[in-house]
Image (spheres, rainbow, N blue to C red):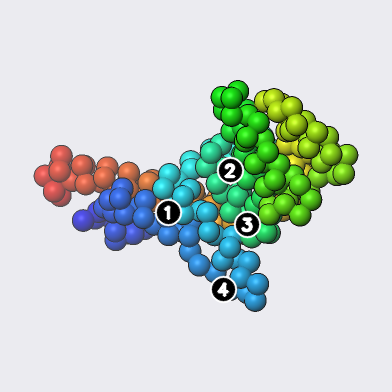
Amino acid sequence: MCKGLATLPATCLKSAKDIKHKISFLLQKPEAQTADQKPVKEKTATAAAAKRAPAAAEVGKWKESFSHMMSSETGRIVFTSFLKSEFSEENMNFWVACEDYKKIAPSKLATRAKQICQQYVDVDAPNEVNLDAATREETKQNVESACPSCFDEAQKMIYTLMEKDSYRRFLNSKLIQDLCQTQTTNSQEKKEKKNCDFAENRQVLTGGA
């Protein structure tokens, strides 16, 4: 099979399903564990992203700007995985909670605002985010008369913190490097399979010569 194409792998007829499994494996491949288990934590959330491996163009957009990545659901999943490795996933969780909060019914705003405040804003909250004293106090006052915009300043501060701090390290992390390598591997496999299929079709047309 695939005569004359010695440079192609023997498994050039690998099915699309097998290719998808390989992508998933590469996204989740284990690394040597360190004392603090940080590399393992960095891989945790990529399982969800692996269900729909992002296209190379999408990953390229994530690297272009933080806003592109945040506008992508898969991008947020992968970035959250990195934040977990730095023990700062509460920043993304808070940002997402604020986005969801703006979409709920007016009758539920007050209850949900207090929940978010208790979870992320209050001093010593279970998942306290890093806000300056003025923004924290302003946000707590806003919650007293809950409206869709009461978390806007706090959300903006956390967004900027992630963009200026964690995102820069994310761009140099092994996580994003592995994902880029996955895209390269996937592209090569697709090209090889296409060449293989072309060779087989040609053999059929020429009588198998």
* Sequence-wise first label, 1 or 4: 1
Q: Name the residue under label 1.
A: 23
Where is residue 177? Give x, y as percent: 59, 55
- Left or right? Give the position of 95 relative to 28: right
* Sequence-wise first label, 2 or 1: 1
4 or 2: mark nearer the eye:
2
* Sequence-wise first label, 2 or 3: 2
Q: What element carries label 1?
A: helix
Q: How many marks?
A: 4
1 or 4: mark nearer the eye:
4
What label sits on residue 113 in the rendered view?
A: none
Q: What residue type is labelled 3?
A: Lys
Where is residue 38? Give x, y as percent: 63, 66
**Distance from label 4 to label 3 (Cα)?**
17 Å
Q: Mark 2 points at which residue?
A: 76
Q: Name the residue under label 4.
A: 32
